[in-house]
Image (cartoon, coloured by chain):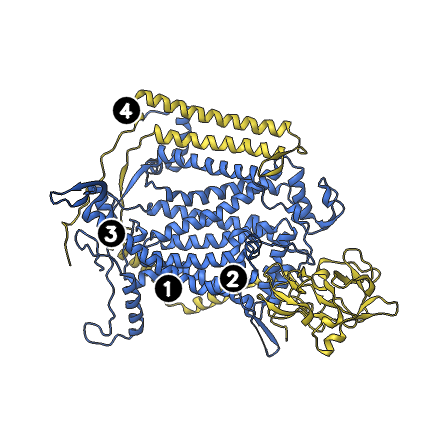
Chain colours: A blue, B yellow
């Protein structure tokens, strides 16, 4: 074999002789990825994370994570001569004196909002298409972990400037910690280094925000992407697409250009938003002091659901045996979020239990073909929307001339009533869409052309749809309800009869479908 | 089950349709120019970015419709960066979509499950190695290893002990003592009843003794709201009425729900509202909760006047202020 001549060839030769990378790269540069706009949502989250790392490092060069009290004598006149923490002073310094500092702060904050929005949108895409099914349950759990960490990381991040609004958020977080039975006061004193607010929490959350959580993020995101890479991406159904293949474009050059270009577009949009739309103007809020507050206190949007839950909570506390349990904090602040996130993480396993389906799935479901799952998703989403709405109840009240009381009672009742309604409506909609698909396959599409028959009757001409389209509409399997087994084939009573009965009931609801045309390709479950 | 039509089979991947740029050299040249122009526009954005950094002072403000008055330096810096990045991205994507191959490729998937023989070999290997190491037999070693491993893993928790002091009675007490004067915040002036008109509200703090300094920790527990009503407007128990002075009533400003400052007073309805979660307290009825998630009224501070006529605390708060905690007895 001849020695490499070009500089690039020499470098490649040097690296390959030490790592054997050529073999791996040769295979992976032509790796195939399916194309769909909804697959870009996760990408947006990834790119926002990179933007957060870049802009965040810039901000740390000037940010002083200290609660040392100083008299402000900087260039922002309205706050001149006021006592505040060094953290707040350095945030003002970044905003007013460092060239590009305010822009970077805005980019960091906008990217954080976008990061969370993209994670949620990506999660919804994965949920509604059933992409979490075997073999991708691990990645679903990692994703739920990333969502949880993202909420914490965002909250700690906007708390760092130590302004009046964010300090109020920290005060609420402290009250949640303090409300925990038995250990609450101790945990709070350990977290804050004594009574609230103390002078320890800014330096501590700074370390968590810039070191601990980003490290976890990097590890989890790496694992998330490696699993996507190794397990190959899911794909939407269509002609030529099966459970055994993946149809799309190769990494080099198409995805390198598309994904690389898309990173710049995401960054560009973030920069544009940051240049034009100012958010979190901390200089208007003033420094934090526990004795003051601003009206219309609102957290960032991804915390809004939690705030909304706390706001709608009924005023219940238990006082017994010299102790207090604050249900009005524990239920909305810890118990309900705990149930929501645990339920979300376990959903792939729950679904696999009531469908009895233990096979691999690489073809995505069209949401209408999984009416039960789609309805469950709409139900959960409605629940969160009601809480989010209530989290902004003060703003809504002032903007729409309503009273806080009206909105609060709407939420308190709506949180129980609206999700089931959303479930029923969504399920009916899915079944109607299945019916429409069925009509399309059986009778073709409407052409708008009218014909008069010899008898003088008018009919609209229908045109058969293409065989590709017909396949896309009918390729899916339709589930069969599992039966309630009271005894096994030997006539022995099933010791888990109650579980089996419940499973049969859920399975029956899950299997409610409109018979698709073109044969009963019911799935067979081994 | 009804079969209205024949079973539909997979027609396979549709034939590839060529783009204009694949077949028409003119279209190809045009796309190439478009990509180049997008990349050039990106360069223009970067030049705007550099020029803004150097030439626009940070003190320059301009008015933008809708957005309001904006710092010109940050605005143009941001616009330059946005254009540079956006056009770079658009150029790359346009290049990929018009000029790079757009023929779909098929790759095979393989089941993740290992071959049966591999699985058996794996289990055999693990069993053999474990047996060789005596993992099944040497229970003394396993137990002592478990013990010391557990101890070692738990010990770092000890190092976290000094994160903070124990709460002791710090959540139960405030700086208010019998005879502590009420001073304005801000201003630090002692107050006479005549300083407050009917309907007025004032935030007060305990007067500092010489040499004492006010910390945020103090404010977080000591902040008190003074509200003056007409004495006949109160609906209080005789004891609570004796805690007021000539229609002036004092409550802890720290919300009994989650500790926010209860700062909104509605003069017409005589309600105090916490902006965080909208707990609403009725002032004439000793800050009874009439709406929202708070479960307890705001603690009332008993006040009177001292010999010089200044408002003072009759006694400390009779209950802890702020949010609930496990050790709180009522």
Residues beneath discs 4 and 1 located on the same chain: yes
Residue in the image at 30% along x and 46% along y = A236
**Residue A42 or residue B38, whichever sits in front:** B38
Pick the quarter of the image with the C terminus of chain A: bottom left
| Placement of B205 over or under A10, stated as above or below | below
Where in the figure is residue A512, as x and y percent of width and height? 27, 61
In the rendering, which numbered label is found on residue A476?
3
Q: Are marks 1 and 2 in contact (CB under 8 Å)?
A: no
Residue bearing mark 1: B134
In primary-sequence order, the first of circles 4 and 1 is 4
> Cα distance, mark 3 to mark 4?
37 Å
Residues marked 4 and 2 touching at CB (< 8 Å): no
Tell me: residue A399, above or below residue A352.
Answer: above
- The secondary element bearing badge 4 is classed as helix
Residue A72 in sight: yes
Callouts 2 and 3 on one subunit:
yes
Disc 1 vs disc 3: Cβ atoms closer than 8 Å? Answer: no
Evaluate if marks 3 and 4 touch, with contact meaning CB atoms under 8 Å apart.
Answer: no
Relative image position of residue B94 (x, y in whole percent): 39, 30
**Residues under labels 2 and 3: Cα distance?**
39 Å
Residue where numbered disc 2 is placed: A309
Residues at marks 1 and 3, common chain?
no
The numbered dot on residue B23 is: 4
């Amino acid at each position: 074999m001849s020695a490499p001549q070009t500089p690039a060839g020499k470098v490649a030769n040097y690296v390959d002789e030490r790592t054997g990378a050529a073999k791996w790269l040769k295979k992976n540069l032509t790796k195939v990825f399916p194309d769909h706009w909804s697959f870009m949502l996760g990408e947006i989250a990834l790119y926002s994370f990179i933007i957060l790392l870049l802009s965040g490092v810039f901000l740390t060069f000037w940010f002083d994570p200290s609660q040392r009290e100083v008299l402000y004598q900087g260039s922002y006149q309205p706050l001149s001569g006021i006592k505040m923490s060094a953290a707040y002073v350095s945030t003002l310094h970044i905003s007013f004196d460092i060239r590009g500092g305010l822009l970077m702060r805005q980019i960091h904050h906008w990217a954080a909002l976008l990061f969370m929005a993209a994670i949620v949108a990506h999660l919804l895409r994965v949920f509604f298409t059933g992409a979490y099914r075997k073999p991708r349950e691990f990645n679903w759990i990692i994703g739920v972990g990333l969502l949880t960490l993202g909420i914490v990381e965002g909250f700690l991040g906007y708390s760092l400037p130590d302004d009046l609004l964010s300090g109020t958020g920290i005060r609420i977080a402290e009250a949640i910690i303090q409300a925990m039975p038995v250990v609450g006061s101790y945990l709070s004193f350990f977290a804050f280094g004594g009574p609230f607010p103390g002078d320890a929490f800014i330096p501590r959350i700074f370390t968590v925000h810039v070191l601990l959580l980003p490290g976890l993020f990097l590890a989890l995101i790496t694992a998330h992407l490696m699993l996507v890479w190794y397990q190959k991406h899911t794909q939407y159904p269509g002609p030529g697409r099966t459970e055994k293949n993946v149809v799309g474009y190769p990494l080099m050059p198409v995805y390198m250009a598309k994904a690389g270009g898309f990173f710049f577009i995401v960054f560009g949009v973030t920069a544009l938003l940051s240049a034009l739309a100012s958010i979190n103007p901390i200089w208007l809020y003033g420094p934090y002091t526990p004795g003051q507050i601003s009206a219309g206190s609102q957290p960032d949007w991804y915390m809004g659901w939690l705030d909304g839950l706390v706001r709608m909570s009924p005023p219940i506390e238990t006082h017994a045996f010299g102790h207090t349990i604050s249900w009005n904090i524990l239920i909305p602040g810890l118990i309900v979020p705990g149930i929501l996130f645990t339920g979300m993480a376990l959903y792939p396993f729950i679904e696999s239990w009531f469908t009895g389906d233990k096979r691999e799935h690489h073809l995505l479901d069209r949401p209408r073909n999984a009416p039960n799952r789609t309805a469950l998703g709409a139900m959960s989403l409605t629940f969160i929307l009601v809480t989010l709405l209530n989290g902004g109840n003060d703003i809504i009240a002032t903007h729409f001339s309503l009273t806080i009381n009206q909105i609060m009672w709407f939420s308190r009742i709506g949180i129980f009533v609206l999700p089931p309604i959303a479930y029923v409506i969504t399920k009916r909609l899915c079944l109607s869409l299945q019916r429409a698909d069925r009509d399309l396959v059986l009778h073709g599409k409407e052409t708008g052309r009218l014909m008069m028959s010899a008898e003088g009757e008018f009919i609209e001409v229908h045109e058969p749809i293409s065989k590709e389209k017909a396949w896309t509409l009918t390729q899916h399997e339709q589930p069969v309800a599992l039966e309630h087994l009271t005894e096994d084939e030997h006539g022995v009573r099933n010791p888990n009869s109650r579980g089996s009965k419940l499973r049969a009931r859920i399975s029956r609801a899950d299997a409610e479908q409109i018979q698709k045309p073109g044969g009963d390709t019911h799935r067979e479950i081994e | 089950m009804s079969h209205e039509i024949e079973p539909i089979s997979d027609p396979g991947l549709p034939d590839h349709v060529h783009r204009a740029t694949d077949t028409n050299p003119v279209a190809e040249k045009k796309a190439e120019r478009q990509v180049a122009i997008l990349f050039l526009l990106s360069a223009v954005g970067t030049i705007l970015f550099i020029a803004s950094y150097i030439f626009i002072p940070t003190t320059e403000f301009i008015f933008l419709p809708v957005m309001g008055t904006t710092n010109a330096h940050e605005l143009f810096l941001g616009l330059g960066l946005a254009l540079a990045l956006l056009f770079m991205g658009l150029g790359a994507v346009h290049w990929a979509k018009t000029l790079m191959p757009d023929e779909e490729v098929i790759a095979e998937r393989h089941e993740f499950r290992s071959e049966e023989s591999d699985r058996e070999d794996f289990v055999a290997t693990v069993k053999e190695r474990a047996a060789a190491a005596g993992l099944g037999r040497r229970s003394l070693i396993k137990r002592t290893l478990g013990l010391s491993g557990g101890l070692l893993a738990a010990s770092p928790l000890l190092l976290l002990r000094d994160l903070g002091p124990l709460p002791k009675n710090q959540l139960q007490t405030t700086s208010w003592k019998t005879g502590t004067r009420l001073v304005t915040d801000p201003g630090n002036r002692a107050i006479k009843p005549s300083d407050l008109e009917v309907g007025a509200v004032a935030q007060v703090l305990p007067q500092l003794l010489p040499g004492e300094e006010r910390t945020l920790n103090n404010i977080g527990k000591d902040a008190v709201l003074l509200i003056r009503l007409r004495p006949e407007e109160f609906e209080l128990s005789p004891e609570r009425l004796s805690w007021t002075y000539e229609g002036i009533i004092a409550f802890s400003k720290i919300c009994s729900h989650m500790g926010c400052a209860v700062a909104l007073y509605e003069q017409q309805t005589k309600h105090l509202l916490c902006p965080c979660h909208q707990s609403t307290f009725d002032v004439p009825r000793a800050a009874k909760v009439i709406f929202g998630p708070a479960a307890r009224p705001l603690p009332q501070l008993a006040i009177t006047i001292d010999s010089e006529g200044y408002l003072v605390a009759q006694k400390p708060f009779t209950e802890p202020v702020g949010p609930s905690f496990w050790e709180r007895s009522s």
